[in-house]
Image (cartoon, rainbow, N blue to C red):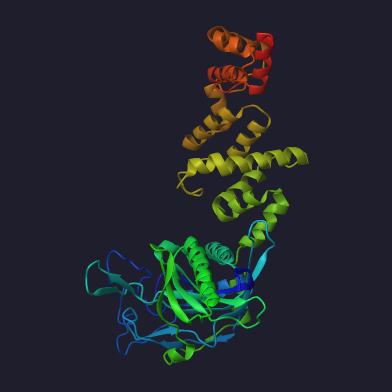
Amino acid sequence: MNKAEFQPVIGLEIHVELKTNSKMFCSCANDPNESQANVNVCPVCLGHPGTLPVINKEAVRRVIKTGLALKSEISMVSKFDRKNYFYPDLPKGYQISQYDMPIAQKGELKFKIKGKEPKTIRITRVHLEEDTGSLVHSKGADYSLVNFNRAGIPLMELVTEPDMSSALEARKFSQELHLLLRYLKVSEANMEKGQLRIEANISIKPKSSKALGTKVEIKNLNSFRVVEKAIDYEIKRQEEVLKKGKKVVQETRGWDEKKSVTVSQREKEQAHDYRYFPEPDLPPLKFSKDKINEIRAEIPELPYNKRTRLSDEYKLDEDSVEFFVYNKDLGEYFEKVVSEFEPNLSKDKLHNLITLATNYIITDLQSLLKERAVEGEDFLITPENFAEFISLIENKTILSKVAKTVLLEMFQTGADPSNIIEEKGLTQISDEEEILIFIEEIISKNQKAVSDFKKGKENALQFLIGQVMTRTKGRINPEQARKILKKKIGV
């Protein structure tokens, strides 16, 4: 078979550390603290005999909230189960998780790849469990250390149906879910800190076959770039195996970043290997419709809906919409700025103002902000002042070069743009006689450039215009300067 005859089938399992004050079943701080090991621990999360877990109510609410945002069915009755396996970072020798009665089931998440139609991925389940500790492997040592600060942190697991057919789709889905979690504020979802961990299940089948191929799982993918690279590699690896007439082995593999390959770790466990049974120390979870509706009311406008609204309401292009959706604070600031424009403006004028505001926020303002937050105390430009600034550009009171100076001053002092322009003498020079004085000065000082332009060298004219703009600190319209220069030189 050649490559075109194969079809990748991809599903994801995504683990998310929930943002709560305390751990899942005890009062220890929800803080993995990698610098000071084993300080956020107690007999409960260390699995001491005779201890009893108590369910973290806020963690349950956050899973319900996520499930609702994903259009899932929320179980009116749910329960916890024991998942038995032995590993050094699992202090009890089992994990409290959920098996056959998860909190949320049958959801979906829609995302879009630029230039393609939107795609909807089905969500099999969203359930709640506890995280494990973390192992520390010292270089050159023949032992590992374990930090139990992370043991017992509330961990939400989301499992998709095998609806993805490329590594890019898996990456885009993961990014969309990450964005959703940030909007819901259920998790910081920082992949570098391990707060969001992705596992991919990949199989390859002939396009003519209805039966799925043998599934291989890649564990602990810790960035969106790695998700795409690892899945792409695994697809090609499995294709090569099948082309040679061999069988793909069902196993768990890891990603070797240095070699950019997946490597075998162990044969994949089946569900029965974990010997699930109901957690005897925890009662079933029972939810009322009123409680679920109360949580539903907390859900904000979600990314996919926001994209549609920004596009329809402000007529923004796709790239600008994506910027404001991913940079939520700047998106909210943009809408506050637009709300400050006069309500009775013509459609064309309002469109011009919105376009200018969009461009200046995405480029100049973002550059000034860098790592500062829009909502922070250090950010001094009010939406009202920014709207006035944009209006001054649109009506040509100031030009682009002067606008950068004004914006920087606004950013540093929070001053009103009109006051800055007046105090610094930055108003545009439009009087032709006044402009002519500057042009005559530039011509007298640059006779060689004038002579070159008369000989047909267009770059000489651009040089002269640049000299005029420098001399006037950008206060003359370049096109007007060009027109008057040509007229004065006599060309």
Q: Total number of numbered labels?
A: 0
Most distant residue in the left direction: 141
Q: Where the C terminus falls, by quadrant? A: top right
Which residue sits at x=58%, y=37%? 385
Instruction: Name the one closer to the observer, 292 or 486.
Output: 486
- Asked if residue 394 lies left or right of residue 235, the reply is right
Q: Where the N terminus falls, by quadrant? A: bottom right
Residue 268 quadrant: bottom left
**Vertical position of residue 426 compared to residue 300: above or below:** above
Q: Position of residue 49 (x, y in %)?
A: 30, 89
Which residue sits at x=67%, y=53%? 310
Q: Position of residue 260 (x, y in %)?
A: 43, 64
Residue 83 quadrant: bottom left
Residue 133 quadrant: bottom left
Q: Is residue 13 visible?
A: no
Instruction: Name the one closer to the observer, 226 or 323.
Output: 226
Q: Position of residue 84 (x, y in %)?
A: 40, 88
**Vertical position of residue 191 compared to residue 161: above or below:** above
